[in-house]
């Protein structure tokens, strides 16, 4: 966490500045209170009222400085939290689809939400509390020395003893925190997986199993959180015992000093107040340190993820935008690690602006070929050529800039039709309307601001596939890949979309199909059978 604090040193410098001003204000209050008591003992009303006015002014300044401190702490905390989030998010640009899939979406969601929230609460918030209390501690110790040197010596000795005790539990607390983050990831992942199968549980009349499984996940999470809370409670008790002993001993010493005339009676109140600040702070510092140390594994995990090298290369100059020489597979073989090859010594050429289909049994490698073409996978043996250029020398981003890849279940997010087609790019409404008409969604041209609900529940499967197709066509890419994109649709709609695709001029099409309709087969320039 130290590196993050240093990275935002300017923001944190302002935080420290306001903390110092607020700390000076509270320290001055102790001395003014002592002066008020001395004035009352001496029946000096003029001095009494002067000090009351001072007290009002100091408290007013304290409130102003505290407000500015809270505001600056909030701004800085959110900057640092987003800095960590963006380390994860920015890494996505370097990952291939295969690398991204090593963790499911629930794990990434847990990192961006649960882990960062925990870092905020147990890390950043505790750090600022530690910092504020440390400043108040230094000011209080300096004030005790000003009152009498013996008070400082006694206080420092007791602080040393108090600080040592909670260190015994530091390792256990870090272990407990890591267990919580793993439990969070597991609960998010398993909950997402279970809820995705709600319809299956419903159809088998077994919702009870779903409920029990969900409850089990959160009971396990609660147990891990309780373990950490119990450990933090032990740290608090140890600090509390030291706090009580320290305050009583300081009170006794200041009373003795007053009896022998070393300090005024009024200074006893200042000593009590300052000692309370010191020992309350020291009692809390051990908890703050334990809490701050506990989130180090979470920060290390994010740092390690952001430093891992992704396989996805940056965009380069070997553009494939205009596919003039086609795609050629030469002696391609592929097999997953420690498994038998699913593709062996395959040779095939996809010529530019022609239409092809890949057919074969389940598991024969149809989708694998598309993944090889998009560099999502690398062949075990053989070469793939784009425009007579070895695919190994072409950046993955360049390849994807040339390809529209339509999946079996098109992805849509909760947003407008315009946003779902643009995907962050800035196509004009006229360009979007043109492709919507082309794919048979004329009625959508007047409703670009219509909201697509989560997972596209307010649209039919055919409409979603057409939106996905429009999303690709508006980018005017030269290659269209369809990975069983119409298999989940009824036959009539599937044929409409497939005919629409095959009628597009000046574009290369490679489609995967289990069962090619005779009318579609006639329009194809070639069929690769696996």
Image: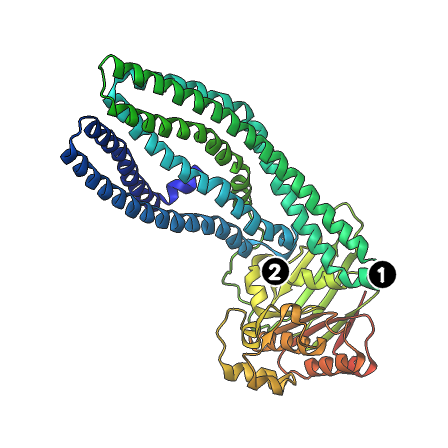
Residue 517 picture location, percent across and down: 82, 79
SS type, badge 2: helix
Quarter of the rendering containing residue 450? bottom right
Q: Residue at x 22, y 15 (%)?
A: 262
**Residue that carries the numbered disc 1 in the rendered image:** 205
Q: Position of residue 159 (x, y in %)?
A: 40, 21
Furthest toward the left, the residue is 46
Q: Is residue 233 above or below residue 214?
A: above
Residue in the image at 65% along x and 58% along y: 376
Side of 258 relative to 375 (left or right) = left
Query: On the image, which quarter does residue 39 sit in?
Result: top left
The percent coordinates of residue 135 (x first, y second) are: 33, 33
User: Where does residue 264 sit, x and y in percent of width and height?
Assistant: 22, 21
- Inspect this view and state whether residue 102 appears: no
Q: Are marks 1 and 2 in contact (CB under 8 Å)?
A: no
Judging depth in this view, the residue of 343 and 486 nearest the camera is 486
Rendered image quadrant of residue 133: top left
Is 454 on the left or on the right of 309, as rendered?
right
Q: Quadrant of the C terminus?
A: bottom right
Foreground residue among 460 and 203: 203
Check disc 1 and report its element: helix, strand or loop: loop
The residue lying furthest to the front in this view is 43
Q: Is residue 41 above or below residue 422?
A: above
Q: Residues within 10 Å of mark 2 (few under 14, many from 20)?
A: many
- Mark 1 against mark 2, which lies toward the viewer? 1
Q: CA distance from mark 1 to mark 2?
A: 51 Å
| Quadrant placement of the N terminus | top left
**Residue 281 — which label?**
none
- Residue 441 vertical position relative to residue 529 in the rendered view, above or below: below
> Which residue is denoted by mark 2 in the rendering?
391
């Amino acid at each position: 966490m130290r590196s993050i604090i240093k990275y935002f040193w300017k923001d944190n410098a302002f935080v420290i500045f306001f903390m110092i001003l607020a700390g000076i204000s509270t320290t001055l209050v102790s001395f003014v209170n002592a002066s008020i008591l001395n004035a009352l003992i001496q029946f000096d009303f003029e001095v009494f009222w002067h000090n009351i006015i001072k007290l009002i002014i100091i408290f007013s300044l304290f409130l102003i400085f505290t407000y500015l401190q809270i505001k600056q702490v909030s701004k800085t905390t959110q900057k640092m939290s987003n800095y960590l989030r963006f380390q994860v998010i920015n890494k996505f640009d370097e990952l291939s689809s295969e690398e991204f899939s090593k963790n499911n979406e629930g794990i990434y969601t847990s990192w961006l939400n649960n882990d960062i929230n925990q870092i905020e609460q147990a890390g950043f918030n505790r750090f600022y509390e530690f910092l504020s209390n440390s400043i108040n501690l230094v000011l209080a110790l300096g004030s005790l020395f000003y009152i009498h040197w013996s008070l400082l010596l006694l206080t420092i000795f007791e602080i040393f003893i108090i600080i040592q005790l909670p260190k015994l539990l530091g390792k256990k607390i870090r272990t407990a925190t890591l267990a919580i983050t793993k439990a969070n990831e597991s609960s998010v992942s398993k909950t997402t997986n279970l809820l995705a199968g709600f319809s299956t549980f419903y159809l088998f009349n077994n919702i009870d199993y779903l409920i029990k499984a969900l409850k089990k996940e959160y009971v396990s999470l609660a147990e891990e959180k309780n373990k950490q809370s119990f450990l933090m409670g032990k740290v608090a008790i140890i600090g509390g015992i030291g706090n009580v002993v320290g305050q009583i001993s300081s009170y006794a010493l200041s009373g003795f000093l007053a009896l022998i005339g070393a300090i005024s009676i009024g200074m006893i109140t200042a000593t009590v107040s300052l000692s309370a600040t010191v020992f309350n702070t020291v009692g809390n510092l051990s908890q703050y340190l334990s809490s701050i140390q506990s989130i180090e594994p979470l920060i290390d995990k994010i740092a390690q993820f952001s430093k891992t090298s992704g396989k996805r290369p940056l965009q380069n100059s070997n553009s494939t935008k205009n596919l003039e020489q086609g795609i050629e597979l030469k002696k391609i073989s592929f097999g997953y690690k420690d498994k038998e090859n699913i593709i062996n010594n395959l040779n095939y050429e996809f010529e530019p602006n022609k239409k092809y289909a890949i057919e074969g049994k389940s598991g024969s490698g149809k989708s694998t070929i598309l993944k090889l073409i998009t560099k999502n996978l690398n062949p075990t043996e053989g070469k793939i050529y784009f425009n007579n250029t070895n695919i190994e020398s072409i950046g993955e981003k360049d390849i994807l800039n040339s390809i529209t890849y339509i999946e079996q279940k098109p992805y849509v997010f909760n947003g407008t039709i315009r946003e779902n087609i643009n995907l962050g790019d800035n196509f004009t409404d006229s360009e979007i309307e043109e492709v919507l008409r082309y794919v048979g969604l004329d009625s959508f041209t007047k409703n670009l601001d219509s909201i697509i609900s989560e997972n596209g529940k307010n649209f039919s499967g055919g409409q979603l596939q057409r939106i996905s197709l429009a999303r690709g066509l508006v980018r005017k890419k030269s290659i269209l890949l369809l990975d069983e994109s119409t298999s989940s649709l009824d036959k009539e709609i599937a044929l409409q979309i497939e005919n629409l695709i095959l009628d597009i001029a000046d574009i290369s099409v490679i489609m995967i199909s289990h069962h090619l309709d005779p009318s579609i087969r006639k329009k194809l320039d070639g069929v690769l059978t696996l």
